[in-house]
Image (cartoon, rainbow, N blue to C red):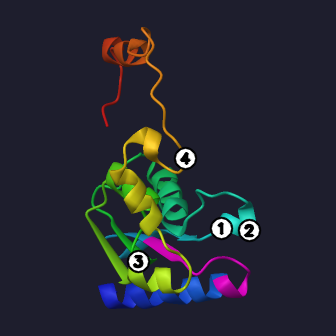
Amino acid sequence: MTPEAFIREVIRLAEANVRRGGGPFAALVVRDGEVLAAGTNRVTTDNDPTAHAEIVAIREACRRLGHFQLTGCDLYTSCEPCPMCLGAIYWARPARVFYAATRHDAARAGFDDALIYDELERPGPARRIPFIHVPDRDAWAPFQAWLDHPDRTPY
């Protein structure tokens, strides 16, 4: 299938998800022309604010692959990923991301993530939800344990 065909499929999945009571978002993880995983937005159906379509698809694809990275895979989404999904995508490391609607289209429908982008520019204590650094002499201990662990898996 072509990128355009996968985009049409992901749009179809997003529309079907709306009819089932979910949000208007869907995603596919594809490798070598084969769909490894599909995800739809399940935020309100699962009462899980992290159940965005991209996250759902990434989790399933990684489970199927038995690995935490999507090397050699492409991610297709019905909409440009939000900041949370963008972070997950970079951690998962797919080869490419294809999307249909833009974040500006999503904002017109009430899914505006501009607040999050703006918040990232503010210092932690000045954010709408304050982020407060609490220094502790043992804060480095988990990292040192990680560095000292002979069988650690880098990512």
| Outermost residue, front side | 126
Label 3 – label 4 distance at C-alpha: 23 Å
Please provide percent x and percent y for residue 145: 39, 13
Q: Is residue 130 magenta?
A: no
Q: Nearer the viewer, mark 2 or mark 3?
A: 3
Which numbered disc flags the more N-terminal residue, 3 or 4?
A: 3
Q: Amino acid at mark 2?
A: Thr
**Are dots 1 and 4 in contact, CB under 8 Å?**
no
**Residue linked to disc 3:** 103
Q: How many neighbours does mark 4 have within 10 angstroms: few (below 14), some (14-19), or many (20 or more)?
A: few
Q: Amino acid at mark 4?
A: Ile
Which numbered disc flags the more N-terminal residue, 2 or 3?
A: 2
Label 1 – label 2 distance at C-alpha: 5 Å
**Are dots 3 and 1 in contact, CB under 8 Å?**
no
Q: Secondary structure at mark 2?
A: helix
Q: Quadrant of residue 18?
A: bottom right
Q: Nearer the viewer, mark 2 or mark 4?
A: 4
Residue depicted at x 38% and y 61%: 117
Label 2 – label 4 distance at C-alpha: 25 Å
Range drawn in magenta: 18-28
Side (left or right) of 38 relative to 139: right
Q: Amino acid at mark 1?
A: Arg
**Residue linked to disc 1:** 42
Q: Nearer the viewer, residue 3 or 117?
A: 117
| Outermost residue, top side | 137
**Residue linked to disc 2:** 45
Q: Image height check: is 140 above or below 119?
A: above
Q: Residue 129: which numbered mark, if any?
A: 4
